[in-house]
Amino acid sequence: MNLKARLSQLLRRADWAEKAFAILLILYAFWRPLWPEWSFVIGVPLFLAGAWLMVRLAHYLIKKAIWRLRNRLVVCYILIGVVPLVLVVVLAGLGIWLMAGQVAIYLVTSELNHRIRGMDAPAMGLLALPSQEREGRLRWMAPYIESLFPNVEYYVRGEREFRYPEESSLDAPPEGWGHARGLMLKQGRIYAWTHGHRGNSEVVLAALLNRESLDGLVPSLGEVTLLIPRSLTGTENGARQGGATRRPRADIGDQPQPERLPPPVNRLDIPVSWATDIPIATWDKPGQTVTGMLKVSTRPSAVLRTVLIQKSQLFSGMLPVFIVFAAVAFLIVELIALIIGTSLTRSITGAVHNLYRGTSRVRHGDFAHRIEVRGNDQLAELGRSFNRMTEDLERLLAVAKEKERLQSEIEIAREVQNQLFPKSVPETKHLQITARCSAARMVSGDYYDYQPLTESKIALAFGDVAGKGISAALLMATVQSSFRTQIHACLEAAGPKANENVSTSKLVSHLNQHLHMHSAPEKFSTFFFGVYDDAASTLTYTNAGHLPPILLRGGEATRLEVNGIVVGAFPFAQYSEDRVRLQSGDLLACFTDGVTEPENEYGEMFGEDRLIEVLARNSERETGEVIDAVIHAVHEWTGSPELQDDMTLLLARRV
C-alpha cells in the first residue's frame, strides 16, 4: 500500500478530535514563524486538543491493560491494598514530620522562656537589696545567670551606677520602660533581657543571642535561628532589601557555616524545619514590639532522642528494639498476605482461564470439552455448572439437528399440501369463487376444493379435520384424495347423465365409509359438499357436521342447514341434502372454527355475529378484499399476529 493510500485510510478512520488536532498542528507550524507573538491563538486550541487526545489514549491503554482478569485483579489489589497502605505511610510520615517540627519548636520556646524567667528572678532580687549590697550580690549570682545565657551583661543603677563586666557598654533603656522581660532588639541585634525598675533603682540584664547560645538551648536538637525583618537591622544590605528576612547580625558572616544538624540515623531520617512567630521588643520604642520568626532545623530522630532522654532512659533503649520487632512482624504479615493473595488470585484467574478456554472450544463446536474442576467452592461449582451446560448443549444440539430434520420434512409436507389445494377456479358465468387457507402451524388440517363437473356445474368442498399439525394434514390429504376419487367415480358411473345423477348425500356417505375404513377411530372431519348449477342458479349441498355456511342476501344473513354428523366417525351415518337458489348479489361464506372461535385477552370468542357484521360491512368489495377484511378483524380481536387455529374461508358470490 502506497503512502497516499495509507493517508487516505488514516483519514477515514480518524474522528473529529484527531482531525482537529492534525489541522491545528499544521496551522501552528505555519503560524508561529510568521506571527510569533500571536502563537497562543493557535497554541491554546492545539494544547486542548492534544490534552483531549492524551486522555483518550490513556483511557484506551487502561482498557487494554485491564482486559485480562489477572490485570484487573492486580489493579483492584493496588487500589484496595497498596494505595491505602501508601496513603497511611505518607500520612504517618507527614504526621512525624509535623510532630517533629512542632515538638522541636515547643522544646526550644519553652526552654527559652524558662531561661528568661530564670534570669528575671535575680534581677528582681537585686532591686529588693540595698544599693551597697547589689554589686557583691551580683558577682555572687553571676555564675548562675551565665549558666542560663553566656555573655550576659548587667547594668545596675541606684545610689551609684555600675556595669558587669566592666567593659560592658550596656546603658539604661530609654524612658518609659517598666518591668519587662523577653526578647529585645537593640541596634540590629537580638537579646534575651529582663528589666526591673523601683524608685530610683533600675536593673537591666541582657544576653546576646548568637548561634552558640541559641543552639545551646536544647543541645543536640539541631539548628536554631532567629529571623527578623531586614529593614530593622540597620545595614545597607538591609535597607536595600527591605522587607526580606535575615538572621541576627551576630549570625551573619561571609564564610560558609558548617552543618549544625545532627547526623541521620538512616535514609528516612530527613531534615525537618519549622518556624513560629515570636514577639520582640524594640529598645528605642518602649512598649512596641516587632514580629520575629524562630526557626528550628532538626531531624525526627533528634527530637525523639531529646524527648526520650528527658522522660525515660529505659524506654529509650527499648524503643529501637520495639520498632525493629514491629517492622519484622509487619513484614511477615505482609509476606503471608502476599502468599495468600497470590494463591487466591491464581485460583480465580485459573478458573476463569479454564472457563474462557472452554467457551472458546464450545464456540468452535467442541461440545465434548470438559474443564478440570478442583475444590468445593463457588469457582468449582461454576466449573461443574459449565460442564453440565456443555452436556446440555450437546444434547440440545442433537435435538436441534433432529428438529431441523423434522422441520425440513414439515416444509416438504407444507409444499406438498399446497399442491393439494386447487390452483385455479373453474370459470362460470354467474359465480365468483375465492378461497384462502392460513395455517396455525406449518401445515393445516383445513380443506377446501372445487372441481368442474360439467360445463354448467361446479362441485364445492369444504372441511375441517380434527386436530392440528402433521396428523391433521395427513387426514386432510386423505379426505382430498377420497373426495376427488369419489367425484371421478360418480362421473364415470353416471356417463352422459352426469348432469342429473351427481348426488351430494351419496358422495358424502361413500366418503364417510371410506374414511372410517382407512383411518384411526378417533380421526374424523367435518365436511361440506355442494354442487352449484350455474344454469339454474341453485346450490345442492350436504353439510356433514360442519359450521353452517352463511348466505348474505340484501344485508340479511341466513345459515344453511346441517344434514348429518361428521365423516369418518360412524360407518352407519346417514346424510341428506338440501337445495338453495342463489340470487344476483348473494354472498355465500364457508368458514372453519379458526375464524369464529379465536379469543381475545378476556376469553371472549370472535363469534359468527362479528363475522356476519364484517361480511355485511364489506359485501360490496371484491371477494379477495372481503377475506382480507375478515382476517384483519380476527387479528385485531386477538391482539396477536399468531393464529390460534387454522383459518380457512371460502367466498362465493352470485353476479
Image: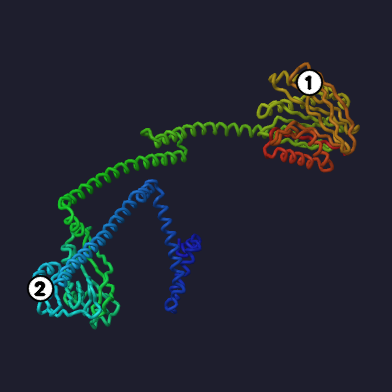
Say which amino acid is labelled 1: His
Compute the Cα span from label 2 to label 1.
162 Å
Any part of residue 549 in sight: yes
Which of the 4 quarters of the picture holds residue 136?
bottom left
What residue is disc 2 on? 133
Which of the 4 quarters of the picture holds residue 452?
top right
What residue is disc 1 on? 510
Label 1 crowding class (10 Å Cα cut-off): few <14, some 14-19, many 20+? some
In the image, residue 550 sits, relative to residue 183, either above or below, namely: above
Instruction: State the count of labels.
Output: 2
Say which amino acid is labelled 2: Glu
Extreme-top residue of the structure: 572
Name the one closer to the observer, 442 or 594: 594
Name the one closer to the observer, 316 or 531: 316
Name the one closer to the observer, 521 or 143: 143
Percent from the top left, x then y, of residue 76? 37, 48
Q: Residue at x 87, y 33 (%)?
A: 456
Percent from the top left, x then y, of residue 590? 79, 32
Percent from the top left, x then y, of residue 219? 16, 63
Which quadrant: the N terminus?
A: bottom left
Name the one closer to the observer, 224 or 387: 224
Q: What SS does tag 2 mark? A: helix
In the image, residue 377 sits, relative to residue 317, either above or below, namely: above
Any part of residue 212 in sight: no
Percent from the top left, x then y, of residue 212? 15, 70
